[in-house]
Structure formats: C-alpha cells, structure tokens
Amino acid sequence: MAHLSSLLSMALVLASFFLSSRKKSLKSLRRVSLTSLQILR
C-alpha cells in the first residue's frame, strides 16, 4: 500500500508539472485529483 501511495503522489507531482506548462491546468488537476481519490477508495 505504501508503494501505491508514493507512486500516486509522484504521478500527481509529475502531472502537475506537465500540466503547469499548459493552460486550464486547474481543471486538469481537479480531474487528476478526483481520479486519484477514486483509485484510493
């Protein structure tokens, strides 16, 4: 479980950096956060 949580956190950070270069990053980040929460559940 610890590995999954760490991987998800790393993926979120990478996604945030990748999307920061583009616009509408907030909406994409919200989608990623929602999907991550669903996966955690």
Image: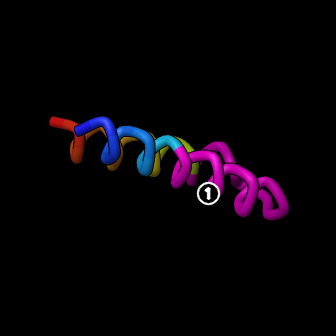
Vertical arrangement, residue 22 with respect to residue 26, above or below: below
Vertical arrangement, residue 2 with respect to residue 10, above or below: above
Q: Which of 27 and 14 is in front in this view?
A: 14
Q: Is mark 1 on a helix, strand or loop?
A: helix
Q: Residue at x 43, y 50 (%)?
A: 7
Is 23 included in the stretch rendered in magenta? yes
Q: Which of 24 and 15 is in front in this view?
A: 15
Q: Nearer the viewer, residue 38 or 7?
A: 7
Which segment is the magenta one?
Answer: 10-28
Q: Which residue is label 1 attached to?
A: 15
Q: Is the magenta stretch mostly helix, strand or loop?
A: helix
Q: In the image, is 29 to the left or to the right of 8?
A: right
Q: Residue at x 65, y 43 (%)?
A: 26
Q: Residue at x 70, y 54 (%)?
A: 24
Q: In the image, is 29 to the left or to the right of 4?
A: right
Q: Nearer the viewer, residue 2 or 17?
A: 2
Quarter of the figure that contains the C terminus: top left
Quarter of the figure that contains the N terminus: top left
Amino acid found under the numbered disc labelled 1: Ala
Which residue occupies the extreme left position in the image? 41
